[in-house]
Amino acid sequence: MELIEKIILTQIYLSGITGKSYKDNLKTKKGFTENIINSKIDELVKNKLITEDKSALTELGRSSLRVVLAGGVFDIIHPGHIHTLNAAKILGDVLVVVVATDNTAIKMKKRQPLHSKEQRQELVNSLSMVDLCLIGQEDDIFKTVNLVKPQIIALGYDQVHQEKFIIEGCKKINLDAKVARLQSPIPESSSSKIQKEYGESIHGI
């Protein structure tokens, strides 16, 4: 499959989650003229990868995209996050990242996050390897998993989620997803350490 076709399929997949126009997103990409977009979409419809009304992916189209889901707090982006997300993106075609809600972040980090969930979402969305960043759900993480329907769920080196818990949760929603434990290098600094050192340096001025 050509790269341009993969990009179109990706944008249609993402529009199904965000509700935004995939054509508007495609027009912002270099080399994507309206004629090229329409021509390729017609071709993809003919090959049964896009529905006849051009609004969504067919089952065949969706299966041709390997979607990776990763999650975390992402309060202060540091090299460990970049390594982890790059490693996650390599596993598939589309990388969707879920940031924890503020309440979940407090439970996980035992501290108030410096940035709100909306700010953390915006920050992660700005990273080049991330195709889409969503805010998670507090009551049931599998609601987001079911929305994204990834083929791979990537866990970072510092995440404590149990693989068995995730696999069993996916089975309950009839999702056949593999869990990948990313072997990213552990960074010198964690978000908590950066915050602590920054706070100490301010007080020392």
Image: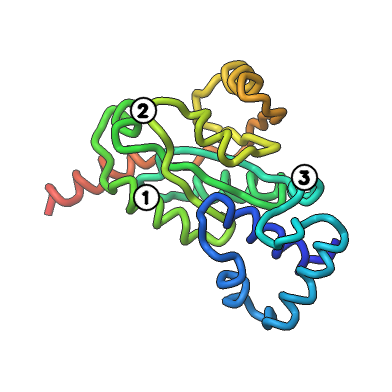
- Whether the residues at callouts 3 and 2 have beta carbons within 8 Å, the answer is no
Comes first in the chain, label 2 or label 1 = 2
Query: Which residue is located at x 35 percent, y 37 percent?
Result: 101
Residue 23 located left or right of residue 19: right
Q: Give the vertical position of 197 relative to 25 (above or below).
A: above
The residue identified by callout 2 is 108
**Image position, residue 191 (x, y; %):** 36, 42
* Residue at the disc numbered 3: 59
Distance between the Cα atoms at labels 3 and 1? 32 Å
| Amino acid on which disc 2 is placed | Met
The mark lying in front, picked from 3 and 2, is 3
**Lower position in the chain sequence, tag 3 or tag 1:** 3
Instruction: Report which residue position mark 1 lands on.
Output: 120
Residue at 34%, 34% in the rendered image? 105
The residue nearer to you, when weighing 98 against 16, is: 16
Looking at the rendered structure, the secondary structure element under dot 3 is: helix
Q: Nearer the viewer, residue 166 or 33?
A: 33
How would you rate the neighbour count of disc 2 (Cα within 10 Å): few for under 14, some for 14-19, many for 20 or more? some
Q: Nearer the viewer, residue 169 or 92?
A: 169
Mark 2 residue element: helix
Discs 3/1, front: 3
Spatial distance from mark 2 to mark 1, Cα to Cα?
15 Å
Q: Position of residue 83 (x, y in %)?
A: 57, 48
Left or right, residue 186 beside residue 88: left
Q: Position of residue 80 (x, y in %)?
A: 50, 44
Question: Reading the chain from its start, which is encountered first: label 3 or label 2?
Answer: 3
